[in-house]
Amino acid sequence: MGDDWMAPLPVRRVRRSDDATLAPGQWPATLAPVAHVLEHGLELSQATVVVGENGTGKSTFVEAVATAYGLSPEGGSTGARHSTRVSESPLAESISLVRGAGAARWGYFLRAETMHGLFTYLEDNPSPRGETRFHELSHGESFLAMLGSKRFDSEGFFVMDEPEAGLSFNAQLALVGAMIQLVSQPGVQVLIATHSPVVASLPGATILEFDEDGIHERAWDDLDLVEHHRRFLEAPERYLRHLRYE
Ligand SMILES: Nc1ncnc2c1ncn2[C@@H]1O[C@H](COP(=O)(O)OP(=O)(O)OP(=O)(O)O)[C@@H](O)[C@H]1O
């Protein structure tokens, strides 16, 4: 983590906004982790990793925080305005971000499921410095090229939703290496939703597990995600035997 601990974080806290319209029985407030944020608020660390089973609300949460920060819900920077399909939840309009005084306003949102559209947008709207031809790279290559670009070399708030999708083990390790570099700079903050034990291992990150009871801070070693991978790799048959039909 950045050794200048006084550097202000772009997003210190997420809380219900004063003019929130989301009713308790209305999706996504029906998801326990979202209800937790609306009721109690949530502090974000310099690096926060969100894990949890499918459908627990990880994407809904990170997308709403990214959108409330001013990032396009389909990915991109604070300036990107591309949109192919409106699928974001009403949560962004019902939360407020408590920003660190004087913190950077720059940011970038990367999500595997919309990267194709983002790359098309970037090719159609190239930066003045020139643009990598992302569509000519593999998914993993383009992802790592994006992380190595100017977009990720300054202070700001960087949000990623399942960045491991399509990345090999080595590419996931490279991603963690890039994250370590990124958060070694004061004023950089990352928020990542992931199913990958490799990505979740980002040193120094606060890990939040989402489940049907709400949000729990956990150590990496104690995550179900890690335990399942560990046990599966030790003896795949332990799991596979439950999947076979007699
Ligand atoms: N517009 C919507 N209206 C009602 N429910 C929705 C809507 N969009 C998504 N959901 C549901 O909300 C739940 C949370 O979805 P979300 O994508 O945030 O989960 P997730 O934890 O990111 O899951 P995954 O790990 O599979 O990506 C899911 O059960 C999903 O089906």
Image (cartoon, helix red, strand yellow):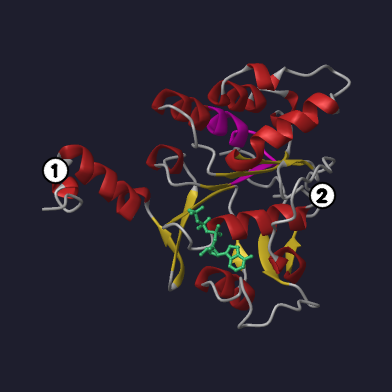
Above or below, comparing residue 210 to residue 241 in the picture? below
Q: Amino acid at mark 1?
A: Glu
Q: Quadrant of the N terminus?
A: top right
User: What's the residue at 56%, 33% (across, down)?
Assistant: 179
Residue 85 picture location, percent across and down: 74, 50
From the image, tell me which residue sits under label 1.
237
**Numbered circles on residues, count:** 2
Along the polypeptide, which appears first: circle 2 or circle 1?
Answer: 2
Q: Residues within 10 Å of mark 2 (few under 14, many from 20)?
A: few
Q: Amino acid at mark 2?
A: Gly
Which numbered circle lies on residue 102?
Answer: 2
Secondary structure type for disc 1 = helix
Above or below, comparing residue 73 to residue 166 in the picture? below
Outermost residue on the front side: it is 246
Residue 230 picture location, percent across and down: 24, 43
Secondary structure type for disc 2 = loop
Residue 239 picture location, percent across and down: 19, 49
Q: Mark 2 or mark 1: which is in front?
A: 1
Q: Is residue 75 left or right of residue 228?
A: right
Judging depth in this view, the residue of 193 and 138 nearest the camera is 138
Which numbered circle lies on residue 170?
Answer: none
For the record, the magenta segment spans: 178-191
User: What's the residue at 68%, 21% (across, down)?
Assistant: 134
Q: Quadrant of residue 137?
A: top right
User: What's the residue at 74%, 62% (across, down)?
Assistant: 98
Above or below, comparing residue 156 to residue 244 in the picture? above
Q: Is residue 222 left or right of residue 206?
A: left
Image quarter where ligand 1 lies: bottom right
Magenta includes 187?
Answer: yes
User: What's the residue at 55%, 73% (across, down)?
Assistant: 36
